[in-house]
Amino acid sequence: MTAVLTTRSTPLILAGMAVERYISICFPLHYSQMCTVPRTLLLICVILILTATPPISDLLITIVNEPLSFFHTTIFCDHPLLFRQRSIYYKNCVFDGVYLSCVALTLLYTYCRIMLTAQAASTGLASVNRARNTVMLHGVQLLLCMLAFVVPSLQAALISLFPRFSLEIRYIFFLVVYIIPRFMSPVIYGFRDEQFRKYWTRYLACRSQRIIRVRPVLLKGNLSSN
């Protein structure tokens, strides 16, 4: 459940961050009124509700349709094995299609608007270019997030072809889909920060700080008192 929530919430968070950049560039005078802490908390609640709806509905459909003996059997923890109803499959296909399409259109719209603002702006191009690059990074992250919706079919096909390596295949896809995208996000945003990048490259290269030699200085006041 936690993996599903974090996986589905990431594209919505990216869309929210892209809209925030769009407002800061295209509506700078209204930014402080539109992007407030209460509205941010409201957006977080909406994201949690949207991401929790599919898994909760899957669980309710399974409870209603499956016999009681199903809940006392030992099953490998895999979504198609736990939720066997075809209605769940079709529901998730429709939800994922609408969900990812809305996020992709949001990123495309904000990127195009920021590009038009960059062409029309005569000053402050640095901030506009930074916002444009940020939205581009959001698009790359969205492509990585979309792997989570494409991989299950590919994983099932590979497991059917190589059943002896089913655990290895699941482990590799787990690293590629869930671990690597979450690792790349803080690294990418960290390298964009100059202060963080300076210390990151220093410690990554195992370069210690330069030792400063301190030489004692005899003050004139001490000489006169002696």
Image (cartoon, helix red, strand yellow):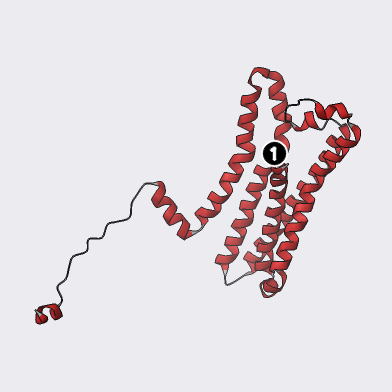
Q: Position of residue 149 (x, y in %)?
A: 73, 38
Q: Position of residue 180 (x, y in %)?
A: 58, 40
User: Tag 1's secondary structure?
Assistant: helix
Which of the image's four quarters has the N terminus?
top right
Query: Is 203 above or below relative to 61?
Result: below
Q: Residue at x 52, y 54 (%)?
A: 190
**Left or right: 24 in relation to 94:** left
Q: Residue at x 34, y 49 (%)?
A: 207
Disc 1 packing (10 Å; few <14; some 14–19; many ≥20): some
Give the number of callouts: 1
Q: Quadrant of residue 126?
A: bottom right
Q: Position of residue 92 (x, y in %)?
A: 82, 40
Q: Looking at the picture, tell me which residue is in the foreground, 134 or 209.
A: 209
**Left or right: 143 in relation to 124:** right
Q: Looking at the picture, tell me which residue is in the foreground, 226 or 39.
A: 226
> Mark 1 — residue?
148
Q: Which amino acid is tagged 1? A: Ala
Q: Quadrant of residue 209?
A: bottom left
Q: Position of residue 194 (x, y in %)?
A: 47, 59
Query: Is 94 above or below relative to 151?
Result: below
Which of the image's four quarters has the C terminus?
bottom left
**Left or right: 54 in relation to 131:** right
**Left or right: 91 in relation to 112:** right
Q: Looking at the picture, tell me which residue is in the foreground, 113 or 226.
A: 226
Query: Is 55 above or below relative to 126?
Result: above
